Amino acid sequence: MSKINVISGDICTLEVDAIVNAANTTLLGGEGVDGAIHRTAGPGLIEECRNLRGCPIGQAKITSAYNLPCKFVIHTVGPVWKGGDFGEEGLLASAYTNPIRIADNMKLHSIAFPNISTGIYSFPKELAAAISITAVRKALKKYKSIKEVLFCVFDEENLEIYNRILSEPSP
Ligand code: AR6
């Protein structure tokens, strides 16, 4: 049985098979969780990312983890929230599903996600949480290598939202 759990804190400290980076389409670093991941990983990560030539919104690409305690980093790009009429919901769901697909393809067992798009990209937190949980639950039915998914939350509001939604019976 795959398990979904919530953990509070810095995703850079997690000793999972893969952490997911909420990057931008250049994959050349940024602020927020992206900045933290690159700072902790060290310069090897940006070197490898340069060779990837960017990543479209909703897609994902995998790299080594360098000085991070996880094994791999899966870089995805969430959508910028523009009010909801620009396919943001589907793109956010893809930003969860594609890393799980890649992790499964690599036969990985554990993966940790930050709350993609809910920082600099301004996606409403409640909606983002509901989309992410639905997308992950659906993906876990298909990608059987993944035994544990961690939602790594970094603020009190997301902690409350994830704990609440995950404690409700799943539809
Ligand atoms: N560990 C876990 N979560 C974190 C950490 C951390 N160390 N630091 C921040 N968060 P954001 P986005 C949370 O802004 O909205 C970058 O410049 C944060 O509180 O990092 O997808 C990229 O290059 C929030 O809940 O990503 C892009 O340009 C969540 O991570 C842009 O930001 C996502 O916030 C992407 O924006």
Image (tube, rainbow, N blue to C red):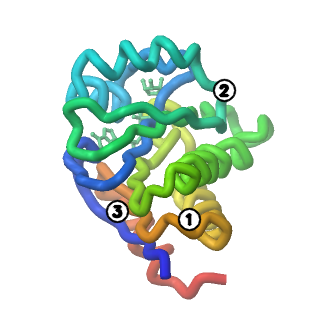
Question: Considering only order in the chain, which callout, 1 or 2, is on the residue closer to the N terminus?
Answer: 2
Q: Are marks 2 and 1 in contact (CB under 8 Å)?
A: no
* Number of residues whose C-alpha sits closer than 10 Å to that of mark 2, classed few (under 14), some (14–19) or many (20 or more): some
Say whether mark 3 is within 8 Å of ligand 1: no
Q: Residue at x 52, y 24 (%)?
A: 24
Amino acid type at circle 3 is Leu
Question: Considering only order in the chain, which callout, 1 or 3, is on the residue closer to the N terminus?
Answer: 1
Horizontal side of 155 relative to 100 (left or right) equals left
* Residue 68 in picture, x, y percent from top left: 23, 37
What is the CA distance from the residue labelled 3 to the residue labelled 2? Answer: 28 Å
Q: Are marks 3 and 1 in contact (CB under 8 Å)?
A: no
* Residue 45 in picture, x, y percent from top left: 34, 22
Q: Which residue is mark 3?
A: 159
* Residue 78 in picture, x, y percent from top left: 58, 37
Question: Considering only order in the chain, which callout, 2 or 3, is on the residue closer to the N terminus?
Answer: 2
Q: Which is closer to the viewer, label 3 or label 1?
A: 1
Q: Which residue is mark 2?
A: 56
Amino acid type at circle 2 is Pro
